[in-house]
Amino acid sequence: MSKAVSADPKRVVEHSRAGRLAAAALEFARFANPHLDPEPYLARLQSMAERVNGSTHLSLRRVISISEGLGGNVDDYHHPHNSLLDRVMDTRRGLPISLSVVWIEVGRRAGLDVQPVPLPGHFLVYAAGQLCDPFHGGEAIGFDEAAGLVAQALGGPPRLDRRWLDPVPDQHIIARMLTNLDEAYAGRGEDHGWVADCLHAVEVGQG
């Protein structure tokens, strides 16, 4: 069912500031799909959380990566759909950051501590104290492997600044998702002014 109100950059900011990360991501996705109803996707996240049995990273992996089959889009990495949460949940393929949003939101609903890990060029999560890679099937990894992921993304030798492991607020995650989306559209020669509008609103909202 289509929504009666138009998508609004201000609501992207409001949701992200209130800790409603998935709602913020679905709000900006409504610019790409004006008929998108966020509620079924939020209900799916809740349903996944209710199926989490246990309190470790494996509890999340069994539901999100194995049962639901969410993982990285290695065949068409730069497609804009990989940054739109509704498309990610429908196709079960996305970027590291959009998949991390699913992990974070399912974890929050299930009462597990899942923190974002914003590496340059890649995105991970700390799930119940374990570093995990949602893009690669939710595998548990160590610092050396994380350093290797940075090298793969940016070139050069493996490297890991421990400051990159510090969690960031939801507004930072949404801003990075929008930046990725802007670059994806630009790579296809498409201009979507709403992305810049949302990104500006989020950046202002962080100040």
Image (cartoon, rainbow, N blue to C red):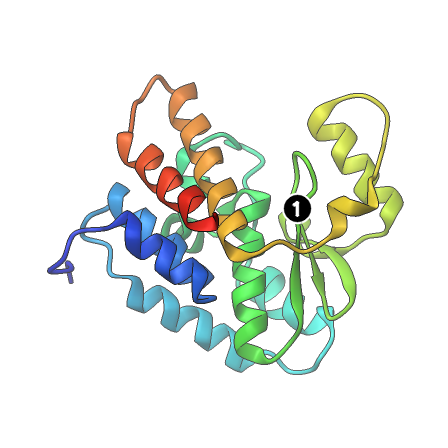
Q: Position of residue 34 (x, y in %)?
A: 19, 48
Label 1 CA crowd tier, 10 Å (few <14, some 14–19, many 20+): many
Instruction: Quarter of the image for the N terminus: give it.
Output: bottom left
Q: Nearer the viewer, residue 148 or 62?
A: 148
Name which residue lies at 74% across and 29% down.
152
Name which residue lies at 43% across and 58% down.
16
- The answer to whether 88 is drawn above or below residue 148 in the figure is below
Name which residue lies at 78% across and 46% down.
163
The outermost residue toward the left is: 4
Q: Position of residue 151 (x, y in %)?
A: 78, 29
Q: Secondary structure at mark 1?
A: loop
The outermost residue toward the front is: 207
Q: Classify residue 201 by image quadrant.
A: top left
Which amino acid is tagged 1?
A: Pro
Q: Nearer the viewer, residue 94 or 185?
A: 185
Return the residue at label 1. 118
Name which residue lies at 58% across and 36% down.
74
Q: In screen coordinates, is 155 left or right of 18?
A: right
The outermost residue toward the top is: 189
The answer to whether residue 7 is seen in the rendering is yes
- The answer to whether 57 is drawn above or below residue 157 in the figure is below
Q: Nearer the viewer, residue 106 or 89?
A: 106
- The answer to whether 194 is drawn above or below residue 136 in the figure is above
Count how many numbered circles sit on residues in the image. Answer: 1
The answer to whether residue 70 is seen in the rendering is no
Q: Position of residue 3 (x, y in %)?
A: 15, 60
Q: Position of residue 124 (x, y in %)?
A: 68, 50
